[in-house]
Every structure is written in C-alpha cells, then in structure tokens.
Image (cartoon, rainbow, N blue to C red):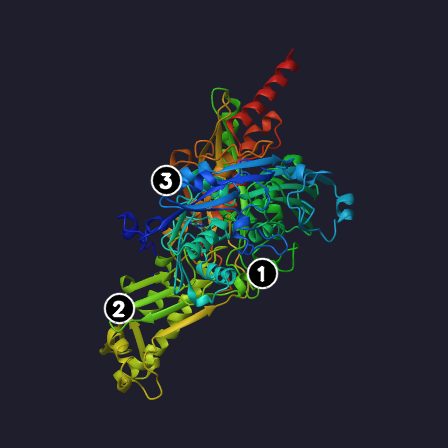
Amino acid sequence: MSLVGARVIRKEDPNLITGRGTFVDDIRPAGCLWMAFVRSTEAHATITSVDKSAAEAMRGVHGVWTLDDLADLPPLPGVPGMERHVLARAKARFVGEPVAVLVADDRYVAADAAEAVVVNYDPLPVVVSVQAAMAEGAAIVLDEIQTNVPFGIPAEDQHDEVFANAPHTASIHLVNQRCAPTPIETQGCVADYGPEGLTMHITFQAPHHMRNAMSAWLGVPQHTVRIISPDIGGAFGSKIVFSPEYFLTAALSKKLGRPVKFVQTRSEAMVLTTHGRDQVHDAEVAFDDDGKILGLRVNVVQNVGAWPDPTGMGLGVLTTWMTSGVYKIPKIAASFSNCLTNTTPVAAYRGAGRPEAAYMVERVIDLVADELGLDAAEVRYRNFIQFEDMPYPSATNEAVCYDSGNFPAAMDELLRLMDYETLKVAQAERNADLSQPLMGIGFSVWIEIAGFGPNGSLEGFGHIGSWESASVRITPDGNAIIATGLAPHGQGNDTAFAQIAADELGIDFEKITVIHGDTETIQQGIGTMGSRAIPLAGEGVKNASIKIRDTAKEIAAHLLEANPADLLVEADTFTVAGSPDKSVTWAEVATASFQPLQLPVGTEPGGLNTTVFQTAPNFSYPSGAYGCIVGIDRDTGAVNVERYVLIDDCGTVINPLLAEGQVHGGAAQGIAQALFEHMSYDEAGQPQTSTLIDYLVPSAADLPGFEAGRIVTVTPNNTLGAKGIGESGAVGAPPAVVNAVVDALSGFGVRHVDMPVTPEKVWRLLSAANGAADAAAT
Ligand code: MCN
C-alpha cells in the first residue's frame, strides 16, 4: 500500500508532546551569559547621549556597548546601500530599535542593567503611514539615501484605451493592514565562540543561509561556523530575517570568550521581529455589461518600515505578479513602490505578497458584481481561466506561468459543499427578520506561488542557488536516515518525507528517520520559505530514494544471483518476481554494501548513501475556493464566522492530515487578519499593540470548525505532482470573510470595510446607515 496519500500521524509528535523537544531556550551551556538591549523609546530621534556608567558598575554586568564601541563590526547583510547596523547609528528610526546592548550573568541582571542605561534623544519629525512618508517635505527615514521611496517598479503600460472605451469602470482603495507574525516561540539564539569556531543554536528557518552569511560577516571560513536550528515553535516567515540580535550574540561571544544567549520576551518580539503585510492598494477595473473584466490597474505601496529587509523589498514583486488571480484579465497594469517609515521593518509573513494580491482581486470581483447587480459566484464563473488554458501565462509578468488548476471545478465543489442555493434563500429570510443577526456570504477563489524557487530564481540567496538538498543513507541494520537542507518548524515534514521514502525504498515507515537543521551534519541546504518542502525537498527525497534503491537492487541481485530488473522490494525485503522464496533483506543488502567481497565487480563499498540537489523548472501554483458565512450582530456590529468552507488544490497530497492542518492554521491566520489582528501605531510612532492583550491573536473559540474539501490537478513540475500548501490558508482566507461582511451590509449601502473588521467599524457603519434612514423618515 502506498503511504503517499495516507493520513499518517506525525512522527515528530511523541517527542514534542512528552516535553522532550529541544528549543533554543532549552540550550544552557556552562558559563552562559545573557544579552539584553536598551531599545529606543522614540520613533525618530537623534541620540544625543548614552550614559552607560550605572549599568557598567552593576554587579554581574560584563559590558555595555553602543555602535561606536563596536565600530569594528560591519553592517548586516541586507539591501545594498541601505544596510542596517547591529545597533542604531546616531539616530533611532523606530520604537524598539536597539540603541545599546549589554551582557550580564543572567537575564534578570541584564534586564535591570538595561533599565539603568540613560539615553537622551532629540526628537525628529515622525512618518508612520506611507501617505505621510511620501508627502512633499516629509521627514527622511534614512539619511544616506535621501528618499523614503528607495525602490519600485512602474507598470509598463496603463492601458488607457481599454479604460477609456470600457462600458464600465470602478475603483477601490484597499488597506492590507500590518500584522505581527506571532509564533508561539519568540526569536532566540545561543552563540558559543570557542577556539575552534562558532556554534550557534538559533531560531532560524534556513540554517545554511545563516551559516554563509555569518561566516562572511565574521570573516571566518564557513566550516568554522556551525548553525543548529533545533525544534522551532513556529516562524511564519519571520525567522528568515537577519535580525541584529543573532549577529550580536555571535560577536559578543567572540569578544567575551563565553557563550552568550538572547531570547526575546513577547513584548520585545512584537517590536523587534519584523512585521508582515502593510500594503495600500489603489485598484481600477474595466468591465463589460456581463461582468467580464477587460482590464485591471493596480498601484501598490508597501510600507517596509525603518530598515529595508531584502524579503520585505520583494513583497511588492510577488503581489504584482499575482494580480491576475484566477481570472482571464487581458490587460493588467500593476506597479509598486516600497516606502520607508518610522516603524518596525516589514518582511516575509506567511504568504508574503500573495495574500495581498488575492485580497485585492477578490474584492475587485465583488465590486464588479455589486456594480452590475450580479451574483458574486456568477461573475467569478464568467472570468475564470479554464482548465484547458493550462499552462497559463499570466498577463502580469513573463515569469508567471500557472502550471495547473481547475478553478471552475473548485468553485463547483465549494458551492456544492456550501449548498449555495439554499443558503441564498436562508439569507433573504434572515436579513428581513430584524430579530436575527445579519447574514453574509463571501467567496475567495485564489491562486498563489509556492515551490520557491525554480532554476535561477534564488541565485544570490546566500550566494548559492535554487535547489534543495536531500540525502538518503541506509545503515547496515537496514534503517534509512534522510537528511534535508530544508529546516521545518511545525509543518510535519519529517512525516511527509518518510512517507515518500517508504514508498520508494520499500522500508518500513518506522525505520526511517529524518534529520535537518544542523550545518555540520548536512553540508548544504537552502531552507524553508515559499512552501517548497514537498515540491523541492520532497521530490529530492524521492529521487535520492530511487537512486539508492536501484543501487541496492544491483547488490541484492548479485547476492541472489538474479537480474536486478526482476527484483521487487517491499516490507524491508528484496524478492525475485515469481520466486518469493528467493529473498534478501534490506539489512543484508546494507551490510553487504560495506563488504567489498560481497559486491558486484566495480561497485564501491558504502554506496547506499547519496545526496540529490533537487531543482525545479518552475514554481508550483496551489489554488482553491473558499467560502465564508458570517452572522453580524445588529446591535454591537460583532462579526461571527458561522461557517468556513475550504476547497484546496495542492496537486498530489502527500498526507491529507498534515495538508489539512496546514490549511487550518493558515486560514486561522487569514480569518484573524480579516477580523482581529492589527499592529498599529499612533502618530508619534508609538506601537499601540505590543502585547497580546492589545494585539488580538485568535483563540480556538473565535474560529469556526472548518469544513474542508479538495480537488486535485497535478503539477507537471515534479514527478510527485505535488504543489506546496503551507501558505494556502493564509492567502485565501481574508477576502472570503470581508466579502461576506460587505455582502451582509450591502443592504445598508456599504461597499467596503477595511480589515480588521472590528465590531466598532461595523457598528459605526450600521449606525450611520440607520441614522441616515431615520433622518430620511423625518
Ligand atoms: N503537504 C502535503 N501535500 C502537499 C503539500 C504539502 O501533504 N502536496 C503537507 C506535508 O505534510 C508538508 C506540509 O504540508 O509537511 C507543508 O509542506 P509545504 O507546503 O511544501 O510547505 P513547507 O514545509 O515548505 O512550509 C512552508 C510554509 C511557510 S512558507 C510558512 S510561512 C509556514 C507554513 O509553511 N509557517 C508555518 N506552515 C507553518 N506551519 C507551522 N506549524 N508553523 C509555521 O511557522
């Protein structure tokens, strides 16, 4: 029986749920010191003085440093010409930016010492919003570049004639608010710089990427830097950023000759860890009387915060690439600008640029339906790219070619599961009954880019390329060890990789161990980003397993005096087809592989060990159709998600249990973005939501029980036929919620509500509409 496609429970869990996981904060080397920051209380200010004397005099403090004291440290790897330093240089540019660092005996002394450092600031004008930062005469965030808009890509053609001649046009202004990634485990690291080099335990998604960058930054050979990403309690994209604290612990460990540790508190994480989203869209759509879209123009402004992070600078590229969504839009003009502000830097967050695109297109489709008085599902059907159109080159950019998908089929399945026709009748009844909550139905038919990245697309990323490494090694007792360069942090990839290998090797699933996350045991790797585990590393595991199996068959055939082509392998055993009594076990073959006299002539000993550097010819494009039903309290404006139906298409599913878990988690984040989460600042740049009291991550009670279905269109870009699914829920979920809310409120003349759709916003809209109705009646 094939394990690919089976609902296998997670290999990882017994360790984790019995408290045997090893997270960074569990690493406590002897003599370890603690690092703490003095962080800016001002959003934009000249640092006029830093008085370290009281802190330096405290017992247990080993040193206090500003950037001037660490002048030998180079800037961090980053965007050329705009590199950030490990500490603020002359000016503070956002609240929470590290101004000074200190090291003490333990975290309590370190925290007290940080309080004792006195920093004087001369405040400067602050820009928080992109509108303020782009205004004439706005305060400049980075003096060295003298502009707040360091990068952007304009549209080649605005398609004016399409818009001038279209029967209808409509426009919409959308704010995709700033979110904090908020994994359960905050960022942390333990650096131990000894005579033989640096060993670092770190919460990082791409250990090899960090090794390469760290060794270059320290100016030491790569093999003297060992990066270990142990168990990681979630990341959602935020642990791929070169945060200053990682580099400082290494530098200070080297300076002091002692291990140095830093683990963010939760409120530090809210301002130190990069944020996500924060885009403003102005979209204009041209369409005909039937609701067929003729053209789409969108201008995106990305708030990148106070320091441009390379992943943050690339978000607009991904958004503009995906502005066609699942629709045939003949003319697209998509442009973006990156804008600096006095806020925490913005970088990758689950979906990274694609949720913003999906949100824009799906709101635009509802806008068209609303303008023409058409059913929102019907307008989608009229514009879908068809199954026969695949592979489909999008009109957005020549790099974007959808590999596979069947959007009408996904929508059919969604409407069937929702029972749409019955729902519409129920909606009409409910909305006419003032004693019942208002009801709204919303859709999101979305597509995203996964499987980062195809040949060439990640070149330059840590000075390597666009692949993932997968090694398979058979031990003499017939067990298999799989090692991948991909370092997961909650996805359950060990289980999925073992399923793939078990099918190819014919070795029992329980006898397969997966390792990752240590640059000493795994020589090269890229890491986790852009839902690439299965399309890249999974495909690599498959190909490495096939290679090993074929070599093993040669040895088994030699031992059995049979033809390798006649051998079958299953249940840990090679048998000769038609002669089941002639067999040899994997353990016997693996043992023989180390015994030269047992091997066929010309076979080297130790050969059941191979590494594949797996590439892909293209991205994979998962897609889906989501439907949401909301109930809105007419008195308070509170939105209740009554049902959420998810139809996903990630091609071949390796493990439905894990794939559904991934979608549930992502959809929870997407629904939370739609209704609850907003990392907000006041006009002085002070964060208003830097604790989990103010920043509303959802609890299980805030979420519906998900109803999940699936369609399968395989990708031609790997032999598994599998696309990534790790970000799908987060990409697809928000628009269905907002579309449902606007649908519920449409009878009150409401055309749009920005996320998060708080009870207050809805209450104000209902009150305004009721007030207007009362005024009209008198
Ligand atoms: N899977 C499957 N069949 C497929 C594709 C995936 O069964 N065709 C299942 C596999 O079991 C696999 C898992 O889904 O283990 C995820 O695989 P994949 O979609 O290839 O994505 P990655 O492992 O590369 O995950 C990255 C993605 C990203 S980019 C973010 S951000 C993210 C996410 O996954 N952050 C997460 N999921 C997360 N899940 C947890 N628990 N924590 C995070 O921080």
Residue density around tag 2, few if under 14, some if 14–19, many if 20 or more, within 10 Å: few
Name the one closer to the observer, 439 or 63.
63
Quarter of the figure that contains the N terminus = bottom left
Q: Badge 1 is on which residue?
A: 391
Q: Secondary structure at mark 3?
A: helix
Distance from mark 3 CB to nearest ligand 1 atom below 8 Å: no
Q: Badge 3 is on which residue?
A: 108
Distance from mark 2 CB to nearest ligand 1 atom below 8 Å: no
- When the figure is inspected, residue 391 is found, relative to residue 679, above or below; the finding is below
Residue 571's label in the rendered image is 2
Marks 2/3: CA–CA distance: 55 Å
> Mark 2 or mark 3: which is in front?
3
Mark 2 / mark 1, whichever is N-terminal: 1
In the image, residue 586 lies at what x, y percent? 27, 73
Give amino acid for label 3.
Answer: Tyr
Q: For this view, does 493 lie left or right of residue 51?
A: left
In the image, residue 271 lies at what x, y percent? 50, 40
Tell me, yes or no, if residue 67 can be seen here. yes
Mark 3 / mark 1, whichever is N-terminal: 3
Residue density around tag 3, few if under 14, some if 14–19, many if 20 or more, within 10 Å: few
Give amino acid for label 1.
Answer: Pro
